[in-house]
Amino acid sequence: MNRKTLLIHVRNILKKRGLTPDEDVKDILKHHMRFFRTRCVDQEGNKFTFKIYLLKLARTRRDFQNEIAFYRYAAKAHLDQFPRWVAGNRNSQNPWIIYHFIPGELFTNYLRKHQHSLSKNLIQKLTHALLAYGNLKLPHNVKKQLHLKPAANNYSDRFRGYLQGNQKNTLLKYLSNAELEAAARIIAFHQLGMKLKSQTAVSHGDLSTNNLLIHQQDFAVLDWEHVQFASPAYDAAEIWVKEFSKAPWRNHLALRLTKSQANSEAFSWLFCIEVLLFCLRDLLLHDRILHELHSPKRKRIVRKLLNYYVKTFRASLRGFSPLLKS
């Protein structure tokens, strides 16, 4: 389907449901991103969001199909943390979805305005939002639609994956061989001793403050393209690592989530291991970015990030409390 045909297709979808878009859908013709998204209004003034996939890449198309299937399940299960599904077609050449518009403010902007501080009540609300979807027991047919398989939570294998080929030489520019060996021993010990391999939960897969909306003290979780089964600490560790402003709220969130677990000690080490693995991933990523940059200012920013990941990795080797103090 070329862009002009797609434009007609989108207009027909919206017209059939009596929706008027806020933006001119002609933007589809000049839109080069993966998605086109616009807010729509019906005759009664109700607001909706329309989102359609534009590219022809099998992998990212499948991700968007997963998001549609997950929203549909969330609507049937009456889960408040997610957009309410209205209509969609995950099998279309260009998959699309319509869901109720969620009012609110991007969590990133909220934190910036409030100087990266959160009240105890908001920490509790965010903890509840993460636990609510993490504890979901997805029906078999939903797992099949999402192509979700029991995660191979073998942290030793994931760790070794970062040491393949020239990647180990890259990591040795920032970390010592002894530190990498210590990480391998810690992962192996806790995976074996606490049976961490068997712990899996529904995971957002790409959680950040840009994927959270806050409205009237409640949180909504958006952009479920990378929904997966992962460890219970995966999302908590990812948002903790990404929020590198040393803001106290991320530590309060980690503590609250840890105390909510049946085995707090196992979860705290699981959190450290996930942080450790995220740091290795981002060291490799940002080292590559550094060599592709020409701007001195941007290079300084990336070097600062690299230093942060090194420091955080070393703190994770020492355990939960030292990590939160880092």
Image (cartoon, rainbow, N blue to C red):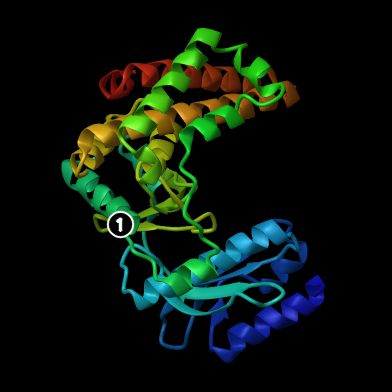
Residue 271 position within the rendered picture, expressed as x and y whole percent measured from the top left: 35, 33
Picture coordinates of residue 249, whole percent (x, y): 28, 35
Amino acid type of the residue that numbered disc 1 sits on in the rendered structure: Asn
**Residue at 23% of width from left, 51% of height from top?**
125
On screen, residue 99 above or below 225: below
- Which quadrant would the C terminus be assigned to in this image? top left
For disc 1, the marked residue is 135
Q: Quadrant of residue 297?
A: top right
Query: Could you tell me residue 56's position as x and y percent?
Result: 76, 63
Tell me the quarter of the picture where residue 274 sits.
top left
Q: Where is residue 162, by image quadrant?
A: top right
Give the class, few, some or many, for how many residues have Cα within 10 Å of label 1's Cα (few <14, many ≥20).
Answer: few
- Residue at 27%, 29% (x, y): give it: 248
Instruction: From the viewer's perspective, tell me whether residue 4 is left or right of residue 18.
Output: right
Query: Which corner quadrant holds the N terminus?
Result: bottom right
Residue at (74, 59) in percent of width and height: 57
**In the image shown, does 292 or 27 lie closer to the viewer?**
292
Residue 178 place in picture, x, y as percent = 50, 8
Residue 162 lies, with reference to residue 306, above or below; the image says below
Is residue 265 visible in the rendered structure shown here?
A: yes
Residue at 55% over, 74% down:
97
Answer left or right for 240 relative to 91. left
Left/right placement of residue 195 relative to residue 30 reads: left
In the rendered view, tell whether residue 299 sits above or below residue 194: above
Farthest-out residue, front = 192
